Amino acid sequence: MTAMTTGSTSRADANRRRILDVALAELLRDPDASMDQIARAAGVVRRTVYGHFPSREALISTLVDGAVAALADADARARAGVSDPAEALARSLLALWPVADRYRLLIALAQRTVTVQGIRERLAPLREDKIRLLQRGLDEGVFVSPLPAPALAYVVEQMLFAVTEAVNDGLLAAEEAGRSAAVSVLTAAGVPAPRATELVTGMS
C-alpha cells in the first residue's frame, strides 16, 4: 500500500469517526435530524456522509452497533475478577447504566428504524454472558427465581429498557436510575432487598 493510499484511508477513517461522533450528538439533540443537518454539523458535504452510510437508517444502525460494543466492554470490565454472582451482577448493572444513559435517546430512536428485534439480535452476546452469570447464581443459591436463566436474562434486559424509557419520560432522574435499576434487577433475581441495597450502596 502506498503512502498516498494510506493517507487517503486515514482521512476516510477520520471522516467516518467524525461523522459518527457528530451524528450521535445531533440525533441526541434532535431525533429527527436529517443527513443534511448531520453533514453540516460535521463540516462535510452530504455526499461524504452518504459515501460512508448509504441511508439514515444505516447510520443509526452503525451508531447502535457502537453502543452495543460500549455496553459489552463496560460489562466485561465490571465483572472481571468478581466471583460472587450478586456482586458481579450489581457491578455490571452500575457500569452499564452510564453507557445506557448516554445512548438511551438513540436506543429509543433506533426502535423506530433498526426495530426491536434488530436491537435484541445485537444484544445477544451480552445476553449470553448474563445467562451464564444468572445460571451460576441460581446454581449457587445466590439468585432465586421460578424463571430459568435465559428467561430471567430477558427480564433483566427489559427492566433496563424500561428504566431508560422512564428517564426519557421524566419519571426518574438519570442520576438515580443506575442505582435504582441495579437494586430492582437484583431483587427480581431473588436477592433480598436489604442485601441488594447494601451491595449497590457500597459500590456507588
Image (tube, helix red, strand yellow):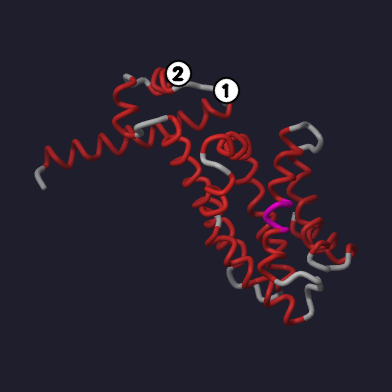
Chief SS of the magenta region: helix
Left/right placement of residue 191 relative to residue 87 reads right
Numbered disc 1: secondary structure = loop
Q: Which residue is mark 1?
A: 30
Q: Position of residue 181 (x, y in %)?
A: 76, 51
In magenta segment, residue 134: no
Residue nearer the viewer, 73 or 166: 166
In magenta segment, residue 156: yes
Circle 2/circle 1 CB separation < 8 Å: yes
Left/right placement of residue 83 relative to residue 175 reads left
* Residue 143 higher or lower than 13, as above or below: below
In the rendered image, the residue lying farthest to the bottom is 140
Which stretch is magenta? 155-159
Numbered disc 2: secondary structure = helix
In the rendered image, the residue lying farthest to the right is 194
Amino acid type at mark 1: Asp
Q: Position of residue 141 (x, y in %)?
A: 79, 80
Left/right placement of residue 181 relative to residue 82 reads right
Left/right placement of residue 117 relative to residue 149 reads left
Quadrant the C terminus occupies: bottom right
* Residue 46 higher or lower than 52, as above or below: above
- Mark closest to the chain's N terminus, 2 or 1: 1
Q: Which residue is mark 2?
A: 37
Amino acid type at mark 2: Gln
Q: Residue at x 71, y 58 (%)?
A: 156
Q: Classify mark 1: residues with Cα within 10 Å, few (<14), some (14-19) or many (20+).
A: few
In the rendered image, the residue lying farthest to the left is 2
Q: Which mark is residue 185?
A: none
Q: Position of residue 22 (x, y in %)?
A: 45, 29
The residues bearing labels 2 and 1 have C-alpha atoms spaced at a distance of: 10 Å
Q: Position of residue 138 (x, y in %)?
A: 74, 77
